[in-house]
Image (cartoon, rainbow, N blue to C red):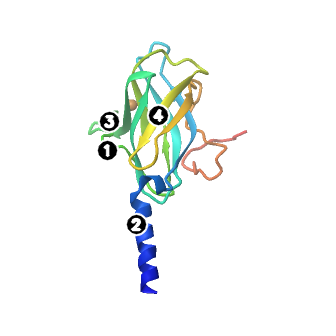
C-alpha cells in the first residue's frame, strides 16, 4: 500500500514539473482593441482571460507587430485623485480556475508607438505569454465604437456594479 502511495506521489510531482504534462491552458474571450483617435500614437486592448488549469499563473508579456512596445498597464489613483496609467512590472495574476477582465479604467494591454493607426474592423495579431501556460496568439478586432467592457453574452459575468438600464 505504501509503495502504491509513493508511486502516485511521484507521478503527481512529475506531472507538476514537466511542462508538457501540465494541463495549463488559457481561454481568451471578448477581446477588442481601440485607440482614442485616428492619429493616436497609442492604443489599448481589453479581454477576459480564464485560467483552465490547476496552476496559478500570470500574464507576463504581450508582443505584437502592431506597435513598437506593448506593455501591461493598470490605472491607479494618485494622491491628487487623478487616475494615471502605470506599467505593471509583475504582470496580471490569473489564479487557477479564475477569470480576469482587462477593461477600461483597469488593467489593460497598452500599445505604444502604433505601427499603423487602428482602423475599425481591422485585426491585430497579438501573442500573450504566461508564466506557466503556453503562449496564446490571437487576432484582436479593432472596435472603436465599443462603449464599455460589455461581455453581455457571458452569463457568468457579474456586472452588478454597472447600471445598464434597459439592455436590449
Ligand atoms: Cu495604458
Q: Which of marks 3 and 1 is in front?
A: 1
Mark 2–mark 4 CB contact (< 8 Å):
no
10 Å neighbourhood of mark 2: few (<14), some, or many (≥20)?
Answer: few
Q: Name the residue under label 4.
A: 127
Residue highlighted by disc 2: 13
SS type, badge 1: loop
Task: Locate residue 38, reporting x and y percent.
Answer: 50, 14
Q: Nearer the viewer, mark 2 or mark 1?
A: 2
Q: Earlier in the sequence, mark 2 or mark 4?
A: 2
Asked whether the residues under the numbered discs 2 and 1 touch, taking CB atoms below 8 Å apart as contact, a structural biologist would say: no
Q: In which quarter of the image is ligand 1?
A: top left
Count of numbered tags: 4
Is the residue under label 1 in contact with that under label 3 (CB below 8 Å)?
no
The answer for how far apart the CA atoms under marks 2 and 3 are is 35 Å
**Cα separation between marks 2 and 4:** 29 Å
Q: Is residue 168 left or right of residue 39?
A: right
| Disc number placed over residue 87 in the picture, else none | 3
Element under label 3?
strand
Distance of label 4 from label 1 (alpha carbons): 17 Å
* Residue at which label 1 appears: 90
Residue at far bottom of view:
1
Amino acid at each position: 500500500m505504501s509503495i502504491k502511495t509513493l508511486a502516485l506521489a511521484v507521478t503527481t510531482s512529475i506531472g507538476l514539473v514537466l511542462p508538457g504534462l501540465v494541463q495549463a491552458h488559457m481561454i481568451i474571450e471578448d477581446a477588442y482593441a481601440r485607440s482614442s483617435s485616428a492619429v493616436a500614437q497609442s492604443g489599448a486592448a481589453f479581454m477576459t482571460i480564464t485560467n483552465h488549469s490547476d496552476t496559478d499563473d500570470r500574464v507576463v508579456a504581450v508582443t505584437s507587430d502592431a506597435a513598437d512596445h506593448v506593455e501591461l498597464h493598470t490605472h491607479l489613483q494618485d494622491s491628487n485623485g487623478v487616475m494615471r496609467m502605470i506599467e505593471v512590472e509583475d504582470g496580471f495574476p490569473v489564479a487557477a480556475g479564475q477569470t480576469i477582465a482587462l477593461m477600461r479604467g483597469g488593467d489593460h494591454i497598452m500599445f505604444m508607438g502604433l505601427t499603423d493607426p487602428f482602423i475599425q474592423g481591422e485585426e491585430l495579431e497579438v501573442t500573450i505569454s504566461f508564466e506557466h501556460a503556453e503562449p496564446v496568439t490571437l487576432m484582436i478586432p479593432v472596435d472603436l465604437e465599443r462603449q464599455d467592457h460589455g461581455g453581455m453574452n457571458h452569463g457568468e459575468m457579474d456586472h452588478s456594479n454597472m447600471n445598464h438600464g434597459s439592455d436590449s
